[in-house]
Amino acid sequence: MINWSVFAQLASLTLVVLSGPAIIFLLYFKQGNM
């Protein structure tokens, strides 16, 4: 049986870890174009 609270925490943590560098890259790319 899956513990959904732990699964949700892992999923949110993974999203934060993946979205962090992506947002930094997008901001850097936009500043580079200007």
Image: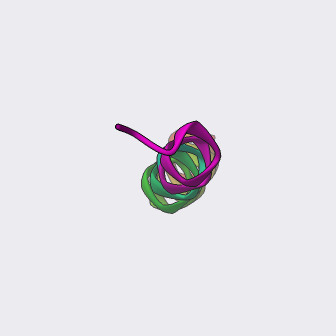
Q: Quadrant of the C terminus?
A: top right
Camera-nearest residue between 10 and 29:
10
In this picture, residue 16 sits left or right of residue 1: right
The answer to whether 18 appears left or right of 33 in the picture is: left
Q: Give the residue furthest to the front.
A: 1
Q: In this image, 10 relative to 31: left or right?
A: left
Q: Position of residue 4 (x, y in %)?
A: 55, 37
Question: Going 61% across and 53% down the picture, which residue do you hit?
Answer: 9
In the image, is residue 15 part of the stretch drawn in magenta? no
Q: Is residue 3 magenta?
A: yes
Q: Where residue 20 sits: x, y (%)?
A: 57, 58
Q: Is residue 4 above or below residue 20?
A: above
Residue at 43% across, 52% down: 18
Q: Is residue 5 above or below residue 20?
A: above
> Magenta segment, which residues?
1-10
Query: Residue at the spot x=56%, y=54% of the render?
Result: 6
- Of the pair 27 and 31, the residue shown nearer to us: 27
- The quarter of the picture where the N terminus appears is top left
Q: Quadrant of residue 30?
A: top right
Q: Residue 3: x and y, percent?
A: 50, 45
Characterize the magenta stretch by its predominant secondary structure: helix
User: Image height check: is 4 above or below 13?
Assistant: above
